């Protein structure tokens, strides 16, 4: 499995232990055990002190489960729905009917693709306006049939190209924000990787929002922020620190409701465990939200997002 820069030391240590096991037959079992204990301590030190930038690199790992993997592993009876009935079908967004834990719902998911061919076909998970309009069509369908909506967010942002702008990219995102704020059915959102800019927010206005431990949620990618503030993308590490984009930051700011734990090192080390965590979160959220009348659900959602950005201020007139 591909290792990330912060894992190089771990990889070298593991390689050394493997070589010693093969060649140094004179070492006794206790010596090997000591080396493996040191490796465990090394992993704990590295993985328990990850920087925001290191979490960004984990969120982008090639082996990390994608939306399509979650659909295959936690959804039952998934039936895909295509097209926005206006222009085209956007492969960066997958939508369809499904059951999760026996509960009927409509799924909206951003998909990046697992290899080069798929990434090109999925436009690297960057939706066009027709993708957001397809998502909106599905939301309205969910409202019509009284079904909850489950969204999987994983995008570096909406596609910024000329063709997308010509077809009303900003308008499509704005329409989704308004529609989700007023949708009379429960919305559960899970951030599974990258969640940047309006491309993420366009399917992330939810009643219950969960975020995987090593994903990130931000107004812009670190590279984009660095290019604007410092005029050079190489300052991405500094930008990641300044953006407060980690799951812990989002939870403290009230942007998300729950941090979903990952295996040490990231979801790609044990996808099955992550599928279970995500499934349990969704089922629990649907159980809770299904008991709330729609008028109260809307008030609760409105209050949730109106509170974002409110910070206590010192009202002492002497200051």
Image (tube, rainbow, N blue to C red):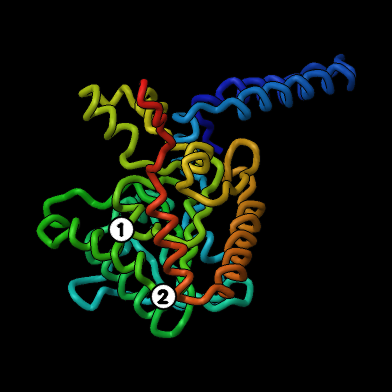
The image quadrant of residue 137 is bottom left
Q: Residue furthest front?
A: 317
Looking at the rendered image, the disc whose residue lies closer to the viewer, 1 or 2, is 2
User: Can residue 158 be seen in the rendering of this structure?
Assistant: yes
User: Can residue 78 be seen in the rendering of this structure?
Assistant: no
Q: 67 above or below 287?
A: above
Give the quadrant of the N terminus.
top right
Residue 184 - label: 2
Residue displayed at 13% across by 55% down: 165
Q: How far is mark 1 from mark 2, CA to CA? A: 33 Å
Q: 41 above or below 89?
A: above
Question: Pointer 1: what residue?
Answer: 121
Residue displayed at 16% across by 57% down: 164
**Mark 2, other Cα within 10 Å: few <14 / some 14–19 / many ≥20:** many
Task: Please report whichever mark, 1 or 2, sits nearer to the chain's N-terminal start.
Answer: 1
Number of numbered discs present?
Answer: 2
Callout 1: SS = helix
């Amino acid at each position: 499995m591909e290792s990330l820069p912060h894992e190089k030391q771990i990889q070298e240590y593991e390689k050394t232990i493997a070589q010693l096991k093969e060649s140094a037959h004179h070492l006794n079992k206790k010596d090997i055990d000591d080396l493996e204990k040191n490796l465990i301590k090394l992993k704990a030190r590295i993985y328990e002190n990850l920087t925001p930038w290191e979490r960004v690199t984990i969120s982008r790992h090639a082996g990390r489960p994608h939306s399509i993997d979650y659909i295959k592993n936690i959804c039952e009876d998934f039936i895909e729905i295509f097209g926005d009935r206006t222009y085209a079908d956007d492969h960066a967004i997958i939508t369809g009917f499904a059951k999760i834990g026996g509960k009927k719902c409509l799924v909206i998911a951003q998909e990046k693709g697992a290899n080069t061919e798929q990434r090109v076909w999925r436009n690297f998970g960057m939706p066009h306006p027709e993708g957001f309009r397809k998502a909106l069509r599905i939301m309205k369908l969910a409202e019509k049939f009284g079904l909850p909506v489950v969204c999987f967010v994983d995008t570096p942002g909406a596609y910024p190209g000329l063709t997308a702008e010509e077809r009303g990219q900003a308008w499509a995102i704005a329409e989704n924000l308004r529609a989700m704020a007023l949708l009379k059915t429960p919305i559960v959102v899970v951030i599974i990787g990258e969640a940047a800019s309006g491309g993420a927010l366009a399917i992330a206005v939810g009643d219950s929002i969960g975020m995987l431990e090593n994903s990130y949620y931000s107004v812009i990618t670190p590279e984009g922020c660095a290019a604007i503030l410092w005029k050079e993308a190489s300052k991405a590490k500094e930008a990641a620190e300044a953006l407060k984009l980690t799951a812990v930051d989002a939870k403290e700011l009230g942007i998300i409701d729950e941090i979903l734990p990952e295996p040490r090192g990231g979801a790609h080390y044990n996808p099955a465990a992550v599928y279970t965590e995500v499934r349990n979160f969704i089922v629990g959220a649907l159980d809770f939200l299904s008991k709330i009348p729609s008028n109260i659900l809307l008030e609760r959602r409105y209050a949730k997002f109106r509170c974002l950005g409110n910070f206590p201020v010192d009202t002492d007139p002497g200051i």
